[in-house]
Amino acid sequence: MQFRMTKHIAINVSDYKKAILFYRDTLGWEVIKEGTSETHFVKGDTNFYIEEKGGKPYEVFFEYEVEDIEAAKVKLLSEGCAISQSYSPQSIMFSDAYGTNFHLYQKEAL
């Protein structure tokens, strides 16, 4: 089974408005779309999503694409990962036993 890391990273922040200014003006991230609780930036070929959505500040979420999400889910759960949110059968948020959070998705149904 292959977990392919995508170029999407989400970060929960403690001060949404100040974070937008910092990432845009200080680090030079380009704003693609700004919303009331999520802003999409790009820097190089990586997409960043700064979020203020009720999560814990400072949480970072990576994203992986898999060919078979059910097999990946079984593997991750057997390794001590926990499902933190399920958006759809092809889109699930996980946290591992070591403090990392990630989004797992299956691009196309089998």
Image (cartoon, helix red, strand yellow):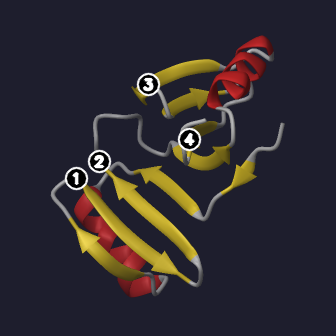
Mark 2–mark 3 CB contact (< 8 Å): no
In space, the residues marked 1 and 4 are separated at their CA atoms by 22 Å
Q: Is residue 108 above or below residue 5?
A: above
- What label does residue 105 carry, if any? 4
Work out how far the residue at label 4 is from the one at label 3, CA to CA, in angstroms: 12 Å
Assign a secondary structure to mark 2. Answer: loop
Taking 110 as reference, is 18 above or below it?
below
Q: Position of residue 84 (x, y in %)?
A: 49, 22
Q: Residues within 10 Å of mark 2 (few under 14, many from 20)?
A: many
Q: Can you identify the residue that label 3 sits on?
A: 85
Residue under pointer 2: 52
The type of residue carrying mark 1 is Ser
Quadrant where the N terminus sits is top right
Counting residues from the start of the chain, the first of labels 1 and 4 encountered is: 1
Query: Where's the C terminus, which quadrant?
Result: top right
Do tag 1 and tag 2 residues touch (Cβ < 8 Å)?
A: yes
- Secondary structure of the residue carrying tag 1 is loop
Q: Which x, y percent locates residue 18?
A: 28, 66
Q: Secondary structure at mark 3?
A: strand
Circle 1 packing at 10 Å, graded few (<14), some (14-19), many (20+), is some
Residue 16, by quadrant, is: bottom left
Q: Nearer the viewer, mark 2 or mark 3?
A: 3
Amino acid type, callout 2: Glu
Q: Is residue 101 left or right of residue 75?
A: left
Q: Secondary structure at mark 4?
A: strand
